Amino acid sequence: MLKQIFIALCLAPIALAQTTPDITIERGVPMKTRDGIILRADIYHPAGDAKYPTLLQRTPYDKNNAADFGRTAAARGYLVVVQDVRGRYTSEGEWYPFKHETEDGYDTIEWAAALPNSNGKVGMFGGSYVGATQMLAAIGHPPHLAGICPVVTASNYHENWTYQGGAFEQWFNESWTAGLAQDTLNRAIRRDTNALAAVDTLPLTQFPVFNLAKPRTGVELTQALAPYFLDWAAHTDYDDYWKQWSIEENFQNIQVPALTVAAWYDIFQGGSLRNYQGLKAHAGNEAARTGQHLLMMIGGHAGGGSHIGTVDFGPAAAEYDENKTILEWYDYLFQGKQNDFATHPVKIFVMGENKWRFEDAWPLERAKSTRYLLHSTGKANSSTGDGALSIASAKSEHADSFTYDPANPVPTTGGPLCCDPQHLPAGPRDQKEVEARPDVLVYSTPPLDSDVEVTGPVTLDLYAASTAVDTDFTAKLVDVWPNGYVQNLTEGILRARYRESTTGPAKLLEPGKINEYKVDLWSTSNVFLKGHIIRLEVSSSNFPRFDRNLNTGKPASTDSTFVKATNTIYHDTAHPSALILPIIPK
């Protein structure tokens, strides 16, 4: 086995060809970037000498993982190119997210378009960071790029990748970075390991097999394997570091049709929808603006199939197949086939009803923005409290208060998570234990007399005060089933010092002063069935999905001291706190 691994490592830089009756596969084909770095790709050729449209994926996750798609698409009449991005697996250079993807993407697209079997028309595909490689290449406007298919990816690598509402996306940032560091570590081992440097070591059992040239502290090891993580934590504001590769700053530079695939429980749901809406409104030409399509599935990074989290969404949910969807998109775009993409620009999965539905736009034009006001006698703490939601006007009411202690934060329970489901499972999960806590305020409607569909953006308009100079406000929309199961649907967070803007400078709170907070809960599509309850949870933490606010105004990236905060939610005539839902008329 070790001999096989050694041979594989030695052969990795060499282009090899494999042939089957249907396709030919070239492996490790080199391409030189404009600054001289060699990137390597596998190329899947259809049989024969004809010219074919080209489908390109640029990935940090190992090009071998796209082998099944490459074979399927080549057999279907596409030339497929799958490339390791700079600094990953078989490609040269140093890995740093986003930094080189516009230039490297441009160079790769133009190289792929000139391959012998290419007809010069290039489309890109793939999800997560592979979606970022598409968006970042597209803003460079390479002449031969003719379409993209970004699946579950972001639009702004500050606000809906690394941060949300000003809070650090701790679980994603740490779990994603840890996973990617494995290949970086392997490359460092191959580069730095030198047995001759320690042959004099006695006793022999003290021989250092590998030590990255010298022992390192945790920060030094992170600097060696993932320096970008330290940069992400340092740049808490939306500053020039983030703006240099923001997609939202460059929608006008994208001039190709796109199929945006997003998901209700996906960590990049907010960014995916912003990509679709931004390109629909601001793409660089009319053909691109009218050529935008959107598909909303359920799980994304939270999982696929009919069973996601602890909910079975029925047989229709299992109909979604990513590879099939990508190929049908390019059959429509490049070959003119009249499939579903020729009829409607938007397709969504409606939860609760558990059905797919075509739409003409997103958000739905027929949705009616409805304010469900918060009510209580000042005792909305936990699901046993008296918090209520209704469309009745606010009146004179006692406020609700709770203590947020960073040493005992509300635990993350499901939701839009990535990238370590073994340790922190994603998707819909029963929220009963979360709602039993006194630091979670719970507001509910009575059981519904008839079905109520909520499809579109969800917002919490919150009036609140804190005893601290900074704190967080979290919100979660849930569907309470008649059997007591509490299904989380969508959620959001707002760091108080960024209540006006994440561009900075941050504005600390005046303790005790009431401020208005607009908490973005992203979007959902769910039919609350007859007998179910519409519920809102409000708190100040969702850990470790988001980093804990220390309540001191200082970031957790540089400080470890914290204080408790007493946070108060107001819902009276002067402060009409409300959950704003897009209700679909029957």
Image (cartoon, rainbow, N blue to C red):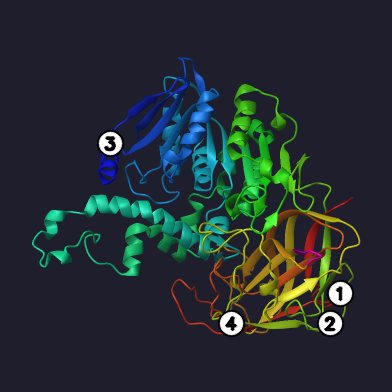
Could you tell which of marks 3 and 2 lies nearer the N-terminus?
A: 3
Outermost residue to the left? 200
| Residues under numbered marks 4 and 2 in contact, where contact means CB atoms less than 8 Å apart | no
Gap in Å between the C-alphas at discs 4 and 3?
55 Å
In the picture shown, does residue 45 fall above or below 152? above
Crowding at dot 2, Cα within 10 Å, few <14 / some 14-19 / many 20+, comes out as some
Q: Secondary structure at mark 3?
A: helix
Q: Is residue 267 left or right of residue 144?
A: right
Q: Quadrant of the N terminus?
A: top left
Gap in Å between the C-alphas at discs 1 and 2?
8 Å
Q: Amino acid at mark 3?
A: Leu
Q: Amino acid at mark 4?
A: Asp
Gap in Å between the C-alphas at discs 3 and 2?
73 Å
Question: Which residue corresponds to mark 2?
Answer: 397
Residue 475, located in which quarter of the rendered image? bottom right
Could you tell which of marks 4 and 3 lies nearer the N-terminus?
A: 3
Question: Which residue corresponds to mark 1?
Answer: 394
In the picture shown, does residue 36 fall above or below 535? above
